[in-house]
Image (cartoon, rainbow, N blue to C red):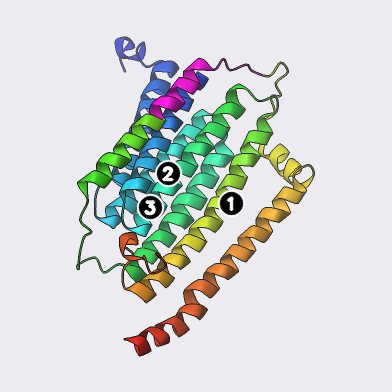
Amino acid sequence: MTPAIAQYIRPEVVAYIAFGLTLILVFGGALLAVLPKNIIHNVFGLATSLVGVAGLFIFLGSEFLAMMEILIYVGAICIAIVFAIMLSQPMHLQLPRRYRPKMIFSFVVAVSIFFSFLGIVTATHWEPALVRGGNWGVARLGRLLFTRYELLFELISLVLLVAIMGAIITAAALTGEDDRSGDKEA
Amino acid sequence: MDSLNTYLFIALLLFCLGLFGLLQRRSLIGMLISVELMLNAANINFLAFNRFLSPDPATGQIMALFVMGIAAAEAAIALSLILALFRRMRSIDIEKARELKG
């Protein structure tokens, strides 16, 4: 590598390029998740966008959360959504038509909320805390989860357990009877 | 890249994209995808405040973890509801699911 090129490859420049690529991932994925009609494209866009969000988490200093983001969202939720698509929507039959008034209405609502929140963000003077701790380690996260936030941790586990049980009951047990009664009515 | 407002702006843009999708989609799975985008925007906000303002860098990360846990529970429930609705209505178009409309 010639010195002339090497002097341009400074860490800041590389960081800016990486940040730009991350933003492209986030917003390209989000547009792909929202706009196309084909639901498989939407899931693919969601996964792309979430990988980008994991990159933003690394920029914000928490690598652990970035790993969890990829593990939970991309690895679990996106795959679960793909399973639900596989079990529900017949892809070849019909793509739902779009009503233009509904799109215009949603666009107006989203844009107005965007500008009102933008006003709040820019008008607020954010004041950092006077004393700021510097310990970003995973070990501290784990220790806090089992001491100060133990009750919350257990509650989340309980919520997940109940949610999964409810999901199984809703998807498997009850619908069998619904199917039979629906057949009788038909 | 290293200021709080940049990240707040990114999160706001992502949130509004998700809101637009949530209002505009007609398939329930598409709406669920948009909700996931909005939850992620909230998570970016948590971590941005954690990075730039908070006195203790662990608290924001723990809150973001809890948001992820709740999001996983929400996705499981929503997907099972979608499956149940599909078995009943043969469609996941929300405009057709109006049996309870008075």
Residue type (three-letter) at the residue carrying disc 1: Gly
User: Is residue B43 toward the left or the right of residue B9 in the image?
Assistant: right
* Mark 3 residue element: helix
Tell me what residue is drawn at x 40 percent, y 70 percent: B85
Q: Nearer the viewer, residue A164 or A55?
A: A164
Using the numbered discs, state the Cα–Cα distance from disc 3 to disc 1 in whole angstroms. 19 Å
Residue type (three-letter) at the residue carrying disc 3: Met
Q: At which x and y percent is residue A152?
A: 72, 49
Question: In the image, is residue A37 above or below residue A14?
Answer: below
Tell me what residue is drawn at x 32 percent, y 58 percent: B27
* Among the two numbered marks 3 and 1 on one chain, the one whose residue lies closer to the N terminus: 3
* Among the two numbered marks 3 and 2 on one chain, the one whose residue lies closer to the N terminus: 3
Q: Chain of mark 1?
A: B
* Among the two numbered marks 1 and 2 on one chain, the one whose residue lies closer to the N terminus: 2
Q: Are marks 3 and 2 in contact (CB under 8 Å)?
A: no
Question: In the image, is residue B39 above or below residue A62?
Answer: below
User: Is residue B38 toward the left or the right of residue B60 in the image?
Assistant: left
- Quadrant, the N terminus of chain B: top left
Does the image show residue A172? yes
**Which residue is labeled 2 in the image?**
B37
Q: At which x and y percent is residue A157?
A: 67, 57
* Foreground tag (3 vs 2): 3
Label of residue B31 in the image: 3
Tell me what residue is drawn at x 42 percent, y 37 percent: B15
The magenta segment: A114-128
